[in-house]
Image (cartoon, rainbow, N blue to C red):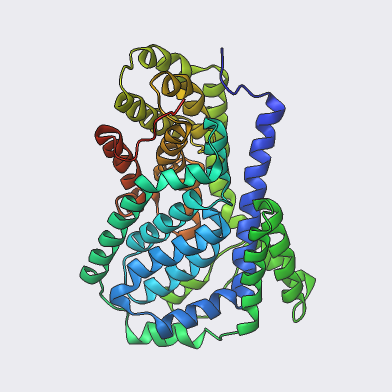
Amino acid sequence: MAICSKSTFSRCADWFITYFLFLLIGMIIALWMRDGVISTLLWSGLQLARPDWFLPAAFVISAVIGTAIGSSFTTIATIGVALMGIGTTFGIPMPMLAGAIISGAIFGDKSSPLSGSTNLAASIAGSELFEHIKNMMWTTIPAFGLSLIGFTGLGLMHHTGASAESLMSLQSHLTPQWWSLTLIGLLFVTAWLKIPAIPTLLINVTASAVVFLQSNSVMTLNHVIMDGFKTTSSDPMVQDLLNRGGMLSMMGTVLIIILALALGGILTEEAILADFMAPLIKQVRTQAEAVIGTLLTGILANFMIGEKCLATILPGELWKPTFKRLGLAPVALSRTLEDSGTVVNYLVPWGVAGSFCAQTLGVPVTHFTVFAIFAWASPICSMISAMTKVGLAQNDD
């Protein structure tokens, strides 16, 4: 019997939601470039940041912002774009920058009580939300520490610096507009009001469009929304940094995701993963085997289905009876689901999260995978916790 079977209508609804979400992200990137939000952040970063310490700073900033707003996609598409621009100007390799930003955003998405993935994992396992977040720190904090150490070392070793000509060219195109930061404030307000991702982005796109129309025509607005922001600079580096956003820029990514979700729908409807795992699950006798098995199932689901929600739901439904049989608490399951289902999708080239990061930050998944330290450190820390039983919650019943 298929787990989490969905009708064709429901599957099409998933596609539409993903499609609309990515279009909104393309629009907000373009509008924030034109409204001066990204320019203000870039200008501030170039004035204040130190190149040698920028990688760990980018990781921590992304983690803080991600935790505050509870959305890795929104963090990467807004603050992440600005951090990429600053870091590239400092001469830091783009794959390292992408790895730091994505790692921080994943931490925020995984740890925030506002996050959809965090609430989903707790719901599937039947654990209380804040107990789930508290228990998750046993693996999240070590993964955070390893990431911070890694990015600090990389930052100290790989700073090369940008040419003075390119730096001057970029600065000539950056004019800080401090009032534009109110749009970032609006993003935080909508997040803290627990407004879902699509309405949050829609509100911010609308506000950004209203600001844009104060000094531009509707025709120009349509052009920016469709094609993105285009700088007048002839410097190739400045063009690479500033020419971003627009709905058309997201079309390739949306196509990949629709194909991945279509394949995931077939695999889910036919219960292929469930049928494959069921005989193996029956052989599990220890708590460590259950945790490691859940991690591997989540990783396999991510690569087979390409969607992190399904990669959380399917392993959760499959392994929940086994965790209960072996005396593990619900928070042990919800933590394990996050340590694989939530984070690994960013490392899948055809996955929703991986495709999004590659398109938004301009770095292929295969290039930033090794530098997305938090994404692969989390399941490793979870395995160590299972084998040592440190932080592995037991059922009191």
Residue 208 in the image, given as x and y percentages of width and height: 70, 70
Depth check, front residue: 145 or 170: 145
| Point 41% across, 36% down: residue | 336
Q: Is residue 66 left or right of residue 194?
A: left
Q: Is residue 332 left or right of residue 36?
A: left
Q: Quadrant of the N terminus?
A: top right
Q: On screen, 28 above or below 254?
A: below
Toward the left, the furthest residue is 157
- Whether residue 76 is visible here, answered yes or no, is no
| Point 37% across, 63% down: residue | 97
| Point 54% across, 61% down: residue | 68
Depth check, front residue: 376 or 189: 189
Q: Quadrant of residue 395?
A: top left
Residue 235 in the image, given as x and y percentages of width and height: 44, 79
Q: On screen, 249 above or below 237?
A: above
| Point 48% across, 82% down: residue | 44
Depth check, front residue: 309 or 8: 309
Q: Quadrant of residue 303?
A: top left
Depth check, front residue: 375 or 172: 375
Residue 246 in the image, given as x and y percentages of width and height: 62, 61
- Whether residue 309 is visible here, answered yes or no, is yes
